[in-house]
Amino acid sequence: METFGFLMQGFAVALQPNYLLLALAGCFIGTLVGVLPGIGPSAGTAILLPLTFQLEPAGAIILLSAIYYGAQYGGTITSVLLSVPGEASSVVTCFDGYPMAQQGRAGSALCVAAVGSFVGGTVATFGLVVAAPTMVAIALQFGPAEQFALMVLGLSLIMVLAGKSVVKALIMGMLGLILGMVGMDPTAGVPRFTFGQMHLLGGLDLVVVVMGLFGIGEILVSLEKKAAPAISASIRSLLPTREEARQSVAPIARGTLIGFALGLIPGMQPSLSTFVSYMAERRLSRTPERFGNGAIEGVAGPETANNAFVNAALIPLFTLGIPTTATIAVLQGAFMMHGVLPGPLLFRDHPDIIWPVIASLYVGNALLLVLNLPLIGIWVSLLRVPYALLYVLILIFTLIGAYSITGSSYGVGVMIFFGVVGYALRKLDFPLAPLVLTFVLGPLIERALRASLQMSNGSPSILFESWTSTVLLVAACLILLSSVPRLSPVNLNEAREDNE
Amino acid sequence: MRGSYFAKLAVVLIGATMMLTGMASAEYPEQGKVIRMVVPWAPGGSVDVFARLMVPGLEKELGATIEIVNLPGAGAQVGMTEVARSAPDGYTLGVASLPGLQTIYLDPARQAAFNNASFTKITLTSMDPEAIAVKADSPFQSIADLAEAARKEPGSIRVAVGGLMGDSHLGGILMEKAIGADVALVTFDGGLTPALTAMLGGHTHAYVGAPPSIAAVAQAGDIRVIGMMSEERNALLPDVPTLKELGFENAVMGASRGIVGPAGLPEDIVAKLDAAIQKAMALPEVQASLKNAWSTAVVAGPAEFQSYWDTLDADTSALMKEVGEQ
């Protein structure tokens, strides 16, 4: 197999000390970038972009890609330990990862996340090598109508996140949709919900909102409790138990598939893959009530999905020159700056660059695992820091993070606002997950729908033109119908009684 | 005696201050001061890459450090507002993309905090005409084919364009008018990338966008460029006819880029910057990168840039009124 030969040559180059060092540096910087709330992979790669000028093209791409997938794991650390998501894609990990940490199982969560990330990234890279053109051709079949259908399917799973009160979940879902509409109308070009504020013209930034709701909100809630010096439950072994490991296998497998598929499809974001994985795990589990209270599946699946997503998203860049996320656009910029045009001719014209890069993806994912497993002990010992000090540090980092994302103190104000909102919602026992899901999905669904309608001159029949979109929409309907019993008056009354 | 002492002191002080100010502007750029180049888009995009390619040469020419600051948001509105509001001291510059920027301030709904007069035009750096492309295996081999199909079934031909009122969208509107038949223009809010993706997936029949956006796939032969919306044939794609030669009038549209500063920038600073930018653009490595990315470098100084901007303002305004955005 020719490809295999090229890949071996790529390994020969990628394993040279200088490229190995670059991959290691990228993993380390990426993890750091992921840990720091607010500085996401796109900001991190953008900051280092000028430095990569000095490197050769292969080295530059190796470094930047390593930062990207490193950041996916880094975000997990703060999500699990502090319930402060460092990126949008680590929000979901807060739901079950943080309760696990509170039960003293933080080491287990981080370990499973690291292994899952490795599996997801490696399998995705394998897919890249073996069947990139085929995968891309399939993915391109997802036009606006199909993207709309897929995302409606994702939205229909929202009931899975509902927990005790269905009504509250739906209210949060609506609120998320409204928040997602803030900014410029994509088709009419007029401001919506901006109240005349120029800073809102670009919409609300997801990471800022999420840091406010989860990070600051969590701090405010904890301030009410009597300040415990540190985690009360003793920190059990840093490794998962056999039971936990067994429970993680299937979620990791499913997470890989979900992340890989979504990474290829145009118009998706890494955070969506984590949501879909989480909702899938919850739906498929025989004991869904464990979710939200430290179910290991809720960490294993999403963590694998986001690494698979990120590695799969490289495929459209390498094969077509199309960047599907902001960070991948930075990678494309890095290629361009070195005079290399990523696209169909990349493998033909620059095999000496692309094959070492691909080989380095394997190497980097392995390095990430090797780098982070021993560090779990150090990260977990963060929990021994007295809460008073810890929360001050979190506040400082999130405030700086909000400023760094938005470039103005307005963003900091927005984050604090949502911090208060998050506090209020928690006190009133409203689930935050549906809000984040619809906040992410809403704008994407709207754009896909409007583009579809523009294609059909306003006729909704375009949504059923292809088999793919029809099947997805029917599936969404079925899922919604199967959730209807929960909405029956009997169940709603029961839920209300439970809450009282 | 006192009075005249103070008067003399005042004269000396005023004289010294004037001398110092005079010296300060003559010393532009000062040692140790960093010049901010605002790119109102996210990193990695075409404008950002262009800035990063040009800046090292510019730094050498000026003898100063230039820092690229990405301020994305609201389609360049956030970043350009910042440039317009900055002090005209030559330490804040911006990369303006036309006609996109103009559509922002020409549309009252956008409530722009700037307009034509808010910026000092320094140097025009590139002009990329819109290219009309189809998939390589498309049944439409030429603009005439597309026009015919559109006339037979109005609204059936789908054309993917970029964001609302961007150069690509405006190009699509002009093309539609030129061929005299209704097409379904599909705007993609995320820019040219999703638009190109949609065409590659066969969801639209054609695509309108500047050559840098299609360089990779066109060079590989996956798509074919069937027309250029320029006055004359483009040097990078010499085999592609212009819509003008094919008989379609008033079908000229492109994306231009230039370096601007806040209004009121002193003339000597403008002249110095313009000279340095033009030299940086002429560097072989910058020329090579632009060519590789299918970007057409066109360089013009402040006066030419200003008059080009004014003409484009009028044209864009007229087009927007027709489309109903004004």
Image: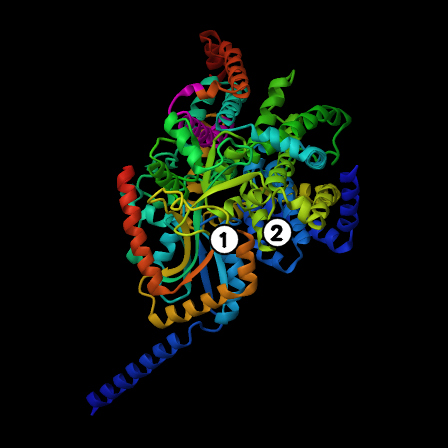
Residue at left offset 56%, top offset 28%: A141
Vertical side of B191 occupied by B21: above or below: below
Q: How many marks?
A: 2
Is residue A55 toward the left or the right of residue A417 in the image?
right
Query: Residue A31: which disc?
Result: none
| Residue tagged 1 | B295
How packed mark 2 is, by other alpha carbons closer than 10 Å (few <14, some 14-19, many 20 or more), is many
Say whether residue A457 is magenta: yes
Q: Position of residue A195 (x, y in %)?
A: 31, 39
Q: Which residues are magenta?
A: A433-461
Q: Position of residue B159 (x, y in %)?
A: 43, 34
User: Within the image, what quadrant is residue A312 found in?
Assistant: top right
Q: Position of residue A88 (x, y in %)?
A: 54, 37
- Say which quadrant the C terminus of chain B sits in: top left
Vertical side of B30 occupied by A413: above or below: above
> Subunit of mark 1?
B
Is residue A182 toward the left or the right of residue A302 in the image?
left
User: Within the image, what quadrant is residue A303 found in?
Assistant: top right
Amino acid type, mark 2: Val
Spatial CA span between label 1 and label 2: 14 Å
User: Within the image, what quadrant is residue A302 found in?
Assistant: top right
Indicate which label's residue lies in the foreground, 1 or 2: 1
- Say which quadrant the N terminus of chain B sits in: bottom left
Q: Main secondary structure of the magenta part?
A: helix
| Residue tagged 2 | A340
